[in-house]
Image (cartoon, grey):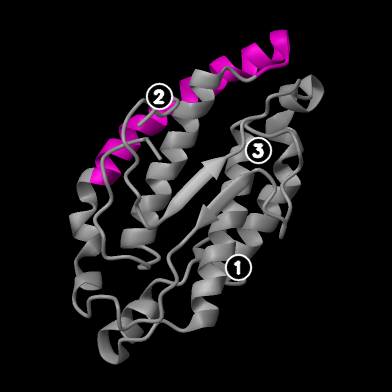
Amino acid sequence: MPPTKGYDVQPTSYPVTLSVDFPDRPLNRLTTFFRIFVAVPILIVLGAVAGGTWQWSSGRDTSTIAIGAGGVLFFAPLLMILFRRKYPRWWFDWNLELQRFGNRTVAYLALMDDRYPSTDDHQSVHLDFPEVSGPELSRWLPLVKWFLAIPHFIVLAFLSIAVFFVVIYAWFAILFTGRYPRGAFEFVEGFLRWGNRVSGYAVVLVTDAYPPFTLAA
């Protein structure tokens, strides 16, 4: 078997998959320089769809109003799997498309693509979940998945610090060369892949397979 590219390890074949097309072309230096500001409109859209709150204070009174339209469905699928062994298809589709939209936005912020994130087209980010209807999932495991995933949350927290500095390095590289260093790109892609596997397992609940501790595909 020929060696794999990037991290030179055997593929894990995990049910939740993510890949980002490497931009083997000059990237837009102007939008890269102002990326954090250019991304504000799409971040507002993502925040509105993913859910959120506004809070303000006036003297002793504090008021909160919800402005979100939804967000990732977690508790409702958990209850349906627990009591009915069912995962409604439209809940599955909602979670998948919301995660895809969020990943496109994150990839744009991480400078992995200079095309503005679409609200529906997949563009360069390819995220897939295994199709589930409920009976193939464990009835009781969703109750403890969040606890079992704690080691992953800890590792991802440390990796996110490294990703921050890698993206800064890529920002300078794009400004001076117009190119995203491939090694840096694969590291950020691996981080996103790892995070989505953990999300698919512990949050979106689309698989009972425990996520591997790896950045590789």
User: The disc labelled 1 sits on which kind of residue?
Assistant: Gly
Instruction: Work out whether residue 52 can be spotted.
Output: no
Instruction: Work out whether residue 100 can be spotted.
Output: yes
Give the prevailing secondary structure in the magenta stretch: helix
Q: Does 120 appear above or below 32? A: below
Left or right placement of residue 193 versus residue 137 in this view = right
**Would you name the residue on which mark 1 appears?**
68
Residue at image point 31% right, 61% down: 202
Residue at image point 49% right, 66% down: 72
| N-terminal label among 1 and 3 | 1
- Point out the stretch of residues depicted in magenta: 152-179
**Would you name the residue on which mark 2 appears?**
162
Would you say residue 160 sits in the magenta stretch?
yes
Residue at image point 18% right, 56% down: 148
Locate residue 40, reporting x and y percent.
71, 43
Q: Quadrant of residue 67?
A: bottom right
User: The disc labelled 3 sits on which kind of residue?
Assistant: Tyr
Q: Which mark is residue 108?
A: 3
Locate residue 201, reporting x and y percent.
32, 60
Label 1 – label 2 distance at C-alpha: 31 Å
Q: Residues within 10 Å of mark 3 (few under 14, many from 20)?
A: many
Q: Nearer the viewer, mark 1 or mark 3?
A: 3
Residue at image point 31% right, 36% down: 10
Q: Quadrant of residue 177?
A: top right
What kind of element bears circle 3? Answer: helix
Locate residue 19, reporting x and y percent.
52, 43
